[in-house]
Amino acid sequence: MSTPRQRSALLRGAAVGAVLLAGVVVVATVRAPSAASPAALAAAPEACSFELCEASGCDAALNPHLCVATGGCSATPWSAKGCSGETCSLGACDQQAPDDRAGSCEHVACPAARCAPDAQQRCGATQPFQCLGGSANLGCSADAFGWVLVVETMCAACCDTRSCATAAAPSGGDPAGTG
C-alpha cells in the first residue's frame, strides 16, 4: 500500500511526464523551414562584393557570414539583434571580380626613392605590393588589392616593387649595359 504522500508524488511525476511527452511531440512536429522555402530565401544574405570579400579578413570556409557594419564574421547568418546593419555571404567570393573602381597595386610604378639600392625596405618577389604611407607604411603584401581596400590611414598608396627591376634595367641597344 502506498501512503497519501507517495500517491501525491506519483501523480505529480505522472503529470510532469505527460507535459514532457507533449512537449516532445510538439517539438518533433515543428520543423525548421527548408532551405528552398520562400522565408529562408528572403532571409539569405546577398553575396558580398569583391571589395568586402577582399577586406573582410574572415575565413569564408569557417565563417562565411559577414556583418558589414562591424566587420564581424560568423558561422551562421546574422540575426537583426546580432548585426544591426547590412550582412552578406562570403560563400561566392571566389566568383567575384573587381569593378572598375577597385584599383590595384599591380603595375603601379614605385617612386625612385623606393627603388634606390639604399631604400629602407623594399618588398620581395613573393609579396611585391608595398604600402607607401599610413600606419602600414613599407608593409608588403602578396594581394594586389590588399592595400587599396583598406582605409587611407592604414595605407594611403601602394606600388608594385617589380617595377623597380624594370626601372633599373638598362635601356637602348646594349642589353648587357656595358657600353
Image (tube, rainbow, N blue to C red):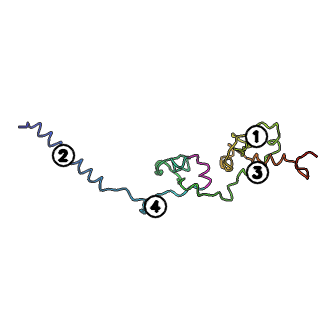
Q: Residue 108 shows which numbered tag?
A: 3
Left or right for 4, reference 67: left
Q: CA distance from mark 2 to mark 3?
A: 77 Å
Q: Amino acid at mark 2?
A: Ala
Q: Quadrant of residue 178?
A: top right
Q: Determine whether the residue tagged by mark 4 lies in a helix, strand or loop.
A: helix
Mark 1: give few (<14), some (14-19) or many (20+) Cα within 10 Å. Answer: many
Q: CA distance from mark 2 to mark 1?
A: 77 Å
Left or right for 125, reference 81: right
Instruction: Name which of mark 3 and mark 4 comes first in the sequence.
Output: 4
Which quarter of the rendering shows the N terminus? Answer: top left
Residue 3 picture location, percent across and down: 8, 36
- In front of the other: label 4 or label 1? 1
Instruction: Name which of mark 2 and mark 1 comes first in the sequence.
Output: 2
Magenta stretch: helix, strand or loop mostly: helix
Q: Determine whether the residue tagged by mark 3 lies in a helix, strand or loop.
A: loop
Mark 4: give few (<14), some (14-19) or many (20+) Cα within 10 Å. Answer: few
Q: Amino acid at mark 3?
A: Val
